[in-house]
Amino acid sequence: MIDGKPSRTCAEKHDTVPVGWRRDAAMVSRMAGIDTLAWFDGEIRNLQEIRVSPLAHALHYGTGAFEGIRCYRQASGRGGVFRLREHMERLSTSCRILGVSIPYDTVTLCEATLETLRANSFDAAYIRPLVFMGEGAMGVAGGDNPIHTLIAVWQWGSYLGDDGMKHGIKTLITSYERTTGNAAPIRGKLTGQYIQSFMAKRQVRALGIDEGLLIDRDGYLSEATGENLFVVVDGTIFTAPDSSPILHGITRDTVLTIAADLKIPVRLERFGRSELYRADEAFLSGTAAEITPVRAVDDRTLRVSPGPVTKAIQSTYLELVRGNGPRATEWITEV
């Protein structure tokens, strides 16, 4: 909402879509940009009016940390941000790993998120906090560069598509390896670290595949380009252990908690492509992707998609984020 008037969505501003173009979230974003209010360095501003120097250190060297968070409309009719504090605490941890001093504490960042959602009159939205190095010393190591903080929000549907949420997606085990801890600070959610994901995602999209899976240096499956990976064999969930080169996803942690609540056995251990090929079912987890079933890996179709375990995890998760379930009070911050 701007000056008391609801802001039009990109789709409303551009009613005509050229032949051959799909009106999806990515295309709408390319057509007009995201026109919302954002929180930038302590002030609410129009996102499209925020200016960043072309010589910002982060643009050249990937020196930034970010988060992906979702706000869901609750049964009460108000918005509710899922695991807001945990996300902002991880953002601070990522900055510490990067060696960047974030200008704001967790409480301030949480309040700024709620303020931004209220300014846009959003009761459901995707939230992107970003901390990055601005213009200053241009060497690789940077210097006393200013540190900028952005919290942007926009309305975003299913990251891997509504059909994918219902029936599952096609995946491909790419040739890209997930970086090891000796090569990069893998425990931080850092902007520059996503170049491998970018390359893998571009590869699979060119082949008409929905999502790419990455391996570790030893050839075991690690995770997808932006999600954690789970497989189900004989009713047991398997996922890469904490020691693997994976992001310790907040949605992953939520899945493990839900599985424990539902008394579904879980084993944290490494597995290869053969174990994935023979799995009964598989799914991905992430803030953007939520719980997305996998129906095919490479040229192999899994036995069932979505399977009973995936359905149980998915339905419980989608209820939880909307305020239903015993953990909702603990994990949801009302707007």
Image (cartoon, helix red, strand yellow):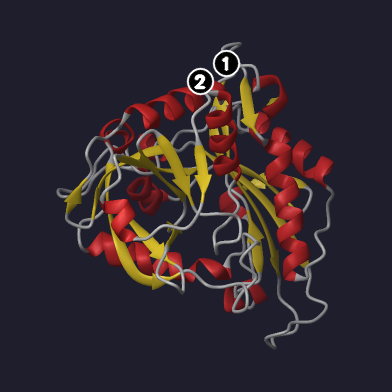
| Quadrant where the image shows the C terminus | top right
Q: Please report the residue visible at 60 percent of the width from the left and 61 percent of the height from the top.
A: 243
Q: Position of residue 217 (x, y in %)?
A: 46, 74
Answer with left or right where residue 56 lies relative to residue 291. Answer: right
> Which residue lies under the disc numbered 1?
324
**Amino acid under disc 1:** Asn
- Is residue 210 among the parts visible in the rendering? no
Q: In this view, does 39 lie above or below 56?
A: above
- Closest to the observer: 18 or 285? 285
8 or 250: nearer the eye? 250
Quarter occupied by the N terminus: top right
- Judging depth in this view, the residue of 189 and 262 nearest the camera is 262
Residue at the farthest top position: 76
Contact between labelled residues 2 and 1, with CB atoms less than 8 Å apart: yes
Residue 329 visible in image: yes
Label 2 secondary element: helix
Percent across and percent down for residue 49 are: 60, 54
Q: Residue 319 carries which label?
A: 2
Q: Residues within 10 Å of mark 2 (few under 14, many from 20)?
A: few
Mark 1 residue element = loop
Q: Nearer the viewer, residue 111 or 323?
A: 323
> Dividing the picture into quarters, in which one does residue 184 lie?
bottom right
Q: Which badge, 1 or 2, is on the more N-terminal residue?
A: 2
The amino acid type of the residue labelled 2 equals: Glu
Picture layout, residue 191 above or below residue 61: above
Q: In this picture, is 315 found above or below 234?
A: above
Q: Position of residue 98 (x, y in %)?
A: 72, 69
Residue 90 position (above or below residue 167): below
At 58% from the left and 13% from the top, the residue drawn is 77
Q: Residue at x 78, y 68 (%)?
A: 100
In the rendered structure, find residue 253 and report the number of the disc placed on it.
none
Report x, y in % for residue 134.
71, 71
